[in-house]
Amino acid sequence: MPQTPATLDAVQLGSYFALMDVAGLLRHAVEQQLRDDGDLSYVQFQLLARLALDSPTGSERMTDLADGVVYSRSGLTYQVGLLEKVGLVDRAPSVDDERSVTVTVTEAGRERVATVIPGHVEVVRQQLFAVLSQQETRALGELLAPVREHMRSAPPRSATTRRRR
Amino acid sequence: MPQTPATLDAVQLGSYFALMDVAGLLRHAVEQQLRDDGDLSYVQFQLLARLALDSPTGSERMTDLADGVVYSRSGLTYQVGLLEKVGLVDRAPSVDDERSVTVTVTEAGRERVATVIPGHVEVVRQQLFAVLSQQETRALGELLAPVREHMRSAPPRSATTRRRR
DNA sequence: TATTGTTATACTCTATAACTATA
DNA sequence: TATAGTTATAGAGTATAACAATA
């Protein structure tokens, strides 16, 4: 890792690399758990969890699902296709807009999420929250939530691929 | 993203997802910059930067390079092989231990790092530090550094692949 | 025997561009 | 014309297991 590059000071650099390293290690651990316990990738888990836990109806349009989860549209089609193939979601044309596709978690999908969550939570606790106090946990979230908002509203340059919002 | 799974409270969940989302978005932005400006993946940049900026000699053994880099040994061989093929590093048997391989940045490798760093720094500044004050930046680093230490010393279960330390 | 590293192989994921269909 | 989504294709990255060589 660089020590004195162009124009980030040492504190910024340290924070940047700590963030990337921690997230990388955590994702690695979490992907292994999801694969072992539920044969899911992290992205598939995100999609399923969003449908099963965040959506009142268990349904979302493809375009809305793409928000924040996946980077390219074809990638979303691919992942949803995999989930459909194994019966964890259904796909159907939207009622109001024939161009849209509505994705819905199946019962099996909800069960899969339920199967996977305890181990998932356990990994996150061991890897991340074992080291942080309640206050620190809160502080971390409060630091990062605005950053996420900023990143989502200000996509990087050369946004050749269309993205929602 | 889940709202009330098994046994993480809402604050923990929020911090967890904020961390993963921010790091994912940041990595995405940064990978694009590295690819555009220097035809490097993030991992390749990490390896080059470590050799060029962290190592006094510009050299490291494969095994030491693997330290802190997440993935498998064969993955490291693959990435170093790519870097060698385009002349950014050299590989040679270590002098003290014939089993080991010593990787060294070439002059071209140093130049590539120098080429890429300004744009890299700019992306990180825009995406991450535009939103954080000095104090917040410091706080973020101080929160995450111990987490990283913990994760590195306590690898996840089923460490089937050997890893250093 | 244990460690260092490579190779062969297979697989997953992602992105680009071209395409269809509806608004 | 613009938007929603799919498909074809191609490439990058990763992991596993078997392997050779040295300690």
Image (cartoon, coloured by chain):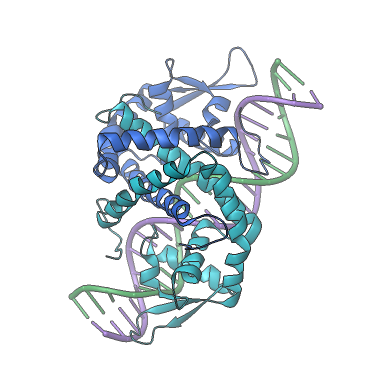
Chain colours: A blue, B cyan, C green, D purple
Reply above or below: C19 against B148. Answer: above
Q: Residue at x 54, y 69 (%)?
A: B83
User: Which residue is at the front of the view, B15 or A165?
Assistant: B15
User: Which residue is at the front of the view, B111 or A33?
Assistant: B111
Where is residue B40? Give x, y as percent.
Answer: 58, 60
User: Which residue is at the front of the view, A85 or B97?
Assistant: B97
Where is residue A60? Give x, y as percent.
Answer: 50, 21
Where is residue B112? Give x, y as percent.
Answer: 61, 67
Reply above or below: A161 against A95. Answer: below
Quarter the N terminus of chain B occupies: top left
Where is residue A125? Give x, y as percent.
Answer: 26, 39
Reply above or below: B71 against A79. Answer: below
Q: Is residue A44 visible?
A: no
Q: Could you say which quadrant of the image residue A134 lies in?
A: top left
Q: Determine whether, in the image, residue A35 is placed left or right of residue B40.
A: left
Q: Residue at x 58, y 17 (%)?
A: A94
Quarter the C terminus of chain B occupies: bottom left
Q: Residue at x 42, y 36 (%)?
A: A143
Q: Is residue A92 visible?
A: yes
Q: Could you say which quadrant of the image residue B109 lies in?
A: bottom right
Report how many numbered discs are placed on residues in the image. 0
Reply above or below: A159 against B78. Answer: above
Q: Could you say which quadrant of the image residue B55 lies in?
A: bottom left
